Amino acid sequence: MELRGITKRFPGVVANEDVDLLIRPGEVHALLGENGAGKTTLMNVLYGLYHPDEGQILVSGKPVVFQSPSDAIAAGIGMVHQHFMLVPVFTVTDNVMLGVEPTGFLGFLERRKARARLVELSQRFGLTVNPDAEVEDLPVGVQQRVEILKALYRHASLLILDEPTAVLTPQETEELFGVIRSLTDAGTSIIFISHKLKEVMAIADRITVLRRGRVVGTVAPADTSEQQLATMMVGREVMLVVDKDPAETGDVVLSVEDLVVRDERGHNAVDGLSMEVRTGEILAVAGVQGNGQTELVEAVTGIRPVVSGTIQVEGQELANASPRDYLDAGVAHVPEDRQKYGLVLGFPIELNMVLNTFEKEPFSHGIVIDYDAIRENANALIRQFDVRTSSPQAPASTLSGGNQQKVIIAREFSHGSKLLVAAQPTRGLDVGSMEYIHAQIVKKRDEGAAVLLVSTELDEIMALGDRIAVMYQGKIIGVLDRSEATREGIGLLMAGRTREAAEVQGV
Amino acid sequence: MSESPEQLQAEVAAGNPPQTVTEYRREQSFPVRLLRDLAVPVLALFTGLLVGAIIIGLSAPDFWDHLRHGEVLQAFGTGASLAGNAYYWLFKSAFGSRQAWSETGVQTVPLLFVGLSAAFSFRGGFFNIGAQGQFLFGAMTAVLMANHFAGMPGIIHIPIVLVLGFIGGAVWGSIAGILKARTGANEVITTLMLNYVAIYLVNWLLITPIFQRPGFPNPITSEAVPSALLPALPGYRIHLGVLIVLACAIIIWWILFRTTIGFQLQTVGANAAAATYAGISVAWTYILIMVIAGGLAGMAGTTQLLTTQTSVIPDFAGSYGFDAITVAILGRLHPIGVIFAAFLLGSLRSGAIGMQSATSLPYYIIIVIQAVIIAFMTSPHLIRQIFRVRQAAATGSESFSKGWAA
Ligand SMILES: Nc1ncnc2c1ncn2[C@@H]1O[C@H](COP(=O)(O)OP(=O)(O)OP(=O)(O)O)[C@@H](O)[C@H]1O
Ligand SMILES: [Mg+2]
């Protein structure tokens, strides 16, 4: 499989320029690059979703033209998009066979046959999944396996994984790596896109770095380092560690007591949780995904109802208040699910940048909206946060994943806030942007804001937290000062092993 | 057609990966945009007229006789000449004289009111198909109030009745808004059911002493008193309602695209979860939508009452409830588009009345034309495929209820 001289232009942006890429059989080829560097676009070209403006695709040395993904699939290419394309109410088997259903006598479905093949594939590559489960009941990690199985079921010999680990727990990532290894052993090639340099170093055979649509170079992990990769991507030295002074804490801003919040299924996802965040400090909440962090964040921003307990912002009782009340109390919120809550994808970027401030001066006077002020604001924020787009009027849906996140960050950092609640703020961001956003969070803190940071990335927790709280099964089972926290200690607490953790931490 | 992510997802999941992904194109110049926006409606109209012509042609009595005798050419000749004749009268009766223009205007006014009502609610993601009930309640309030305040000078009387007619429709409309806001009840079901409630409630009210015309055995109200009636151009039926409805269209345009209310409404329509996140009260927005949409439909009933149909009878609302949807979709949920759509359907109607008396072809042929138009408007893919129109850029302006097409 080979890409030769691929160029793909969008109005005002050259997403890919003269890109050459050679994929060898059985290799893991990692693609690295900043947000908006053109990784997803290149893969969409390879998958037949876009037609390149120039260049050609070669399969086993012969040039081919993919009119649509069906052609790409027929040529043995499979792609797992970052946002899964599964039918939630169908079973795993139904999802996998959809579109290529085996039929027998009189066109009746032969579900049994499909199921057998699915079971065989999943055993061969260690993709454990219950073929009869309904997709909506499965955790993301397992849904991803279904996506991979879908591609394998269609005889993919080249599998494209676009940021597969962004939504996975470290445990799930390890399992995915196991699957990738067994696939490559069987001769399948993998294109692996990730912003996490550690992962890329661990799994890739070769790494191609893109910058602003062009190939910067292809290297092997053995011949490079994380620092060097970061420099290749961004084109300058990147600080991989956060530089910050000790916190100067002041009064309590957010105080939560005995909070109980239910999830969709009616379980107490947050179960008697208490905590405090003060001005000038970053409280980093660590924990394995699914221990109630999402519900906690939604409760302290007014999105999710509270069953019992109190939430106070600067002494004002806000449990069960509306999101508007929280906004008015000076709470900014970077939501975990950016496409569901953070953005209206069909709206222009400039409107997304005032999504929760459009009613205020200077963006409106009385009830009349001032589009000039909105445009000015957008232009300033786009420049300041380096959002890669051709126009502030482009719909948010045309932005790359990382740039969508930057739009939210830009908005939430620009309205005056006493408390910043940031859930997974750098998920899907490149190292350069991550460095920038980390610096911004620290700046917010130094300006006297209280910051509640929720992250499943231990690195991020360790880099930013002044105090580190570990959440386990709806409770905070330990709060450590950054100075006394160790990775192992936090790791043990995240697994709920308080006793061993106490020994390691010596507290 | 800007496919929504869900739609894309469904198509991909169903094994029909999309042929292309919509790409954002830079704002095109005004004429280009206009052409692009008009392509589908104009082609839908054209197809509607074509299908209508074929049906008229087939209905020509000589057509089958000729065909039976193997005279294919003559058969098509008579068919085509009948259709041509019909459309000649249709056009002439809609635009052929000042009287014709006046009639077209009269037909357009209520269509424009209800079309604005539907477009406004669809933009907010509220699939209100209850214009019929709101229309009736506007008219019922108006007739009651017109006669209650009998004796006032028109210059005060008319505005009072118009405002109260708006409120009548708004109150009825807000029931569905409140139901959705409080309980999440599906508005398609509630507005549809409330239409039936309205129809039977009005049927009953019409035989109660409050409404029934004294001395009459059948369900009919008294006539609205003359001082409440909208002034008409001397010698014509065209009336002040034309100016009122155009003003309403401009106000609705302004609300949608220039005010925080419009921003709020379109955010709720495009992504209710994000609206909640942004501190917008989705529940209040639904209620507000239905107050305004209901009020507009109520104004439609009121202006009808104060002009051409001066008393309310059971069938008063005619087919305006469903015409509302046709006009809104044909006008692509944009107030300016809705003006053209209402004018188009209005001229079809005034034309059809003339056509019926001149050619004795049934008036209902225009219902067929209207149905074909709506079928094509709601499936732009079909029209594009037939006429090979290029995909519009992903500005979202074309999606059915979602999008920001300022
Ligand atoms: N449909 C589109 N229309 C217009 N521009 C687009 C479209 N899709 C992508 N772009 C632009 O092309 C560039 C490359 O985007 P792409 O999604 O390929 O980036 P990426 O490398 O995948 O970034 P990320 O790591 O943030 O996902 C960006 O500037 C983006 O705004
Ligand atoms: Mg991407």
Image: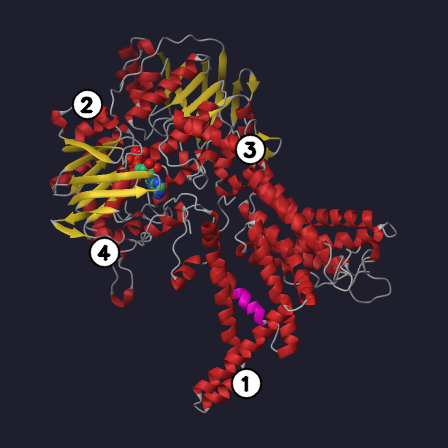
The N terminus of chain A - image quarter:
top left
| Residue receiving disc 1 | B61
Badge 1 density bin: few <14, some 14–19, many ≥20, Cα 10 Å:
few
Q: Is residue B364 above or below residue A81?
A: below
Q: Amino acid at mark 4?
A: Lys
Q: Is residue B104 above or below residue A361?
A: below
From the image, state whether disc 2 or disc 4 is nearer to you.
Answer: 2
| Residue receiving disc 3 | A370
| Residue receiving disc 4 | A113
Prevailing SS of the magenta stretch: helix
Give the magenta range.
Answer: B365-371
Badge 4 density bin: few <14, some 14–19, many ≥20, Cα 10 Å:
some
Q: Earlier in the sequence, mark 2 or mark 4?
A: 4
From the image, state whether disc 3 or disc 2 is nearer to you.
Answer: 3
Q: CA distance from mark 3 to mark 2?
A: 46 Å
Q: Position of residue B166 (x, y in %)?
A: 71, 48
A180 with respect to A443 (left or right):
left
Magenta-span inclusion, residue A277: no
